């Protein structure tokens, strides 16, 4: 079972995650969730990406909270089992970056 990250652990993992990506829009913590809005070239690109991530999420047994409007996907990651952010959220965030 994953353990809830402390504020210090979150800050360190967030810095590592954000320095690995060139995007203007970075990951941030909002209301205790790891959040980012991904912007794609089209609705089909956005939805295709969601399909790939859905398969990974199921494999990891760790599921995103997300919503899609046209070419945008708003993502909010949290580990419900521990009531906060854990390593699993950062693992899923990294997968999302790999496939975007
Ligand atoms: C029973 C099952 O393992 C749990 O409910 C899993 C499923 N997917 C999950 N997804 C997320 N985001 N957080 C969880 O705590 C979680 N727990």
Image (cartoon, helix red, strand yellow):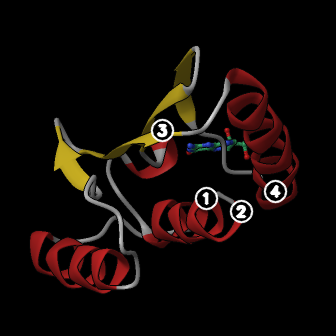
From the top left corner, tell me how far across and down residue 45 is, in percent: 74, 37
Q: How many marks?
A: 4
- Tell me if mark 3 has few (under 14), some (14-19) or many (20+) residues whose alpha carbon lies within 10 angstroms of its own: some
Report the residue marked by disc 4. 56
Q: Is residue 17 above or below residue 55?
A: below
Residue drawn at (42%, 45%), measured in percent from left and top?
A: 78
Q: Quadrant of the N terminus?
A: bottom right
In 3D space, how far apart are the residues under numbered discs 3 and 4 (Cα atoms)?
20 Å
- Tell me if mark 4 has few (under 14), some (14-19) or many (20+) residues whose alpha carbon lies within 10 angstroms of its own: some
Residue drawn at (34%, 64%), measured in percent from left and top?
A: 4
In 3D space, how far apart are the residues under numbered discs 4 and 1 (Cα atoms)?
9 Å
In 3D space, how far apart are the residues under numbered discs 4 and 2 (Cα atoms)?
10 Å
Q: Quadrant of the C terminus?
A: bottom right
Report the residue marked by disc 1. 96
In the drawing, does residue 83 fall left or right of residue 40? left
Tell me if label 4 and label 2 are in contact, CB under 8 Å: yes
Q: Secondary structure at mark 1?
A: helix
> Marks 3 and 1: which is nearer the front?
3
Residue drawn at (77%, 60%), measured in percent from left and top?
A: 60
In 3D space, how far apart are the residues under numbered discs 3 and 1 (Cα atoms)?
12 Å
From the top left corner, tell me how far across and down residue 56 is, in percent: 81, 56
From the top left corner, tell me how far across and down residue 95 is, in percent: 65, 67
Q: Secondary structure at mark 3?
A: strand
Report the residue marked by disc 2. 99
Ligand 1's image quarter is top right
In the drawing, does residue 12 fall left or right of residue 52? left
Q: Quadrant of residue 10?
A: bottom left
> Marks 4 and 2: which is nearer the front?
2
- N-terminal-most mark, 3 or 4: 3
- Tell me if mark 2 has few (under 14), some (14-19) or many (20+) residues whose alpha carbon lies within 10 angstroms of its own: few
> Marks 4 and 1: which is nearer the front?
1
Q: Secondary structure at mark 4?
A: helix
């Amino acid at each position: 079972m994953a353990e809830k990250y402390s504020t210090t652990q979150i800050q360190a993992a967030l810095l590592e995650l954000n320095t690995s990506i060139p995007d203007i829009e970075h990951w941030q913590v909002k209301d205790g969730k790891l959040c980012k809005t991904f912007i794609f070239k089209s609705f089909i690109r956005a939805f295709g990406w969601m399909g790939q991530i859905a398969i990974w999420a199921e494999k990891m047994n760790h599921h995103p909270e997300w919503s899609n409007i046209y070419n945008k996907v708003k993502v909010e990651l949290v580990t419900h089992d521990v009531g906060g952010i854990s390593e699993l959220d950062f693992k899923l965030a990294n997968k999302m970056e790999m496939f975007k």
